[in-house]
Amino acid sequence: MPVKLADYFVSLDTYEKRANVNFVSHAHADHMSGLRASRPCIASEATMQIIEAKKHRKFESLQLPKNARMLNSGHMLGAKQLYIDSEHYGARILYSGDYQMQRSPVAEPIETIEADILILDSTYPYPNIEFEEKELVIGAMQSYMRDKLNRGPILFSAFATSKAQEIIRICNDMGITPCASEEVCRISDIYCANGVPLEYQPISEKELSSRNVYIAESRKIDQLRMELSRRHSRIFAATASGFAKFMRFNTDVQFTLSDHADFKQAMDYIEHVAPKVIYTCGPSSETFARNLRAFGKNAYSIGSRSKINELILYNTEKQ
Ligand SMILES: [Zn+2]
């Protein structure tokens, strides 16, 4: 069973047959799979706006009961954690999808709160993967762009939601107004409407001749690269992703710009939450839980989130 909240059973960023409400922590596709038109949704206003722009339809949103609240997760615009001070379980429960302790230039900073039970996503489960300070990565990106732009255009492939906006802001801070794909512009408009000022322009025929920074999602990159190569003898292909820490991309340069917590940040986050028990979820949950236990944390993998109600009950009845 999913998590019980007042009269509802809430699924957490995933599809659950027995849930009648979906919590969507943020508007990345891998956290939106539980969305159904027939069920109300718990999400921030900004997340709802991005979801509706992506899905081209409206979803009913549910007001949270008094014993629950959402807190910023620092991951992207509108991204939230779900906190429930539950009489039913006799415990304070905190669910966190994607989050980061570092400050994103285009997201609200993370808020933390103490809880008894922490349910945690497991994107970077290994202690040896450690991200540099964001300021250093941003500095490296800016000096690369300064160096290359007088020789040719720079083409960034990035997720259209959140990473693209971060790159736009990084460009804006050095006086560049980048050209962005239609999808990136559409999502960036929502960022602007929610108080994140960004300067960008759509990619036009005329613009393709200029030595500028171009930003597009990966499925659009090949076509854009081809169009730019007709007008420029040299194009610099770049990408920015946390996965650049251990994966090689087919680009001239890759920057480890992550909007996730690495293991060290996860430990810091856990210190703030001070949970009695941690349930890890997601594809790397076994590894993450094992590594957290090696660092003295009371952590267990739940793999899928479908038994979370039973696990919380088991845990709270034990106490
Ligand atoms: Zn995400």
Image (spheres, rainbow, N blue to C red):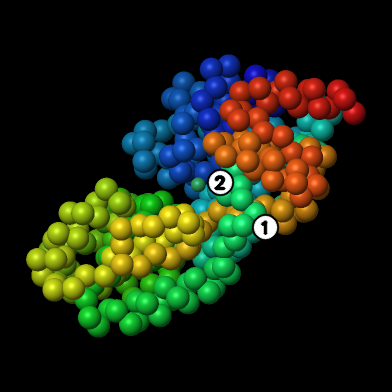
Name which quarter of the figure residue 133 lies in. Answer: bottom right
Residue 138 rendering spot, x and y as whole percentages: 48, 72
Instruction: Find disc 2 in the rendering and name its residue.
Output: 123
Label 2 amino acid? Thr
Mark 1: few, some, or many residues within 10 Å (few <14, many ≥20)? Answer: some
What residue sits 63% from the left and 36% below the top? 286
**Among all residues in the image, which is located at the extreme left?**
230
**Is label 1 within 8 A of ligand 1 (CB to nearest ligand atom)?**
no
Residue 218 rendering spot, x and y as whole percentages: 30, 51
Residue 238 seen in render = yes
Mark 2: few, some, or many residues within 10 Å (few <14, many ≥20)? Answer: some
Name which quarter of the figure residue 207 lies in. Answer: bottom left
Which residue occupies the foreground of this view, 269 or 186?
Answer: 269
Q: Is residue 250 left or right of residue 234?
A: right
Residue 245 rendering spot, x and y as whole percentages: 49, 59
- CA separation, marks 1 and 2? 13 Å
Q: Is residue 170 above or below residue 314?
A: below
Instruction: Find disc 1 in the rendering and name its residue.
Output: 264
Q: Earlier in the sequence, mark 1 or mark 2?
A: 2
The count of marks equals 2
Q: Is residue 250 left or right of residue 130?
A: left
What residue sits 31% from the left and 52% below the top? 217
Locate the N terminus and report the quarter of the image it occupies: top right
Residue 20 seen in render = no
What residue sits 72% from the left and 20% below the top? 310
Label 1 amino acid? Lys
Q: Is residue 74 above or below residue 233?
A: above
Which residue occupies the foreground of this view, 159 or 136?
Answer: 136
What residue sits 38% from the left and 52% below the top? 159
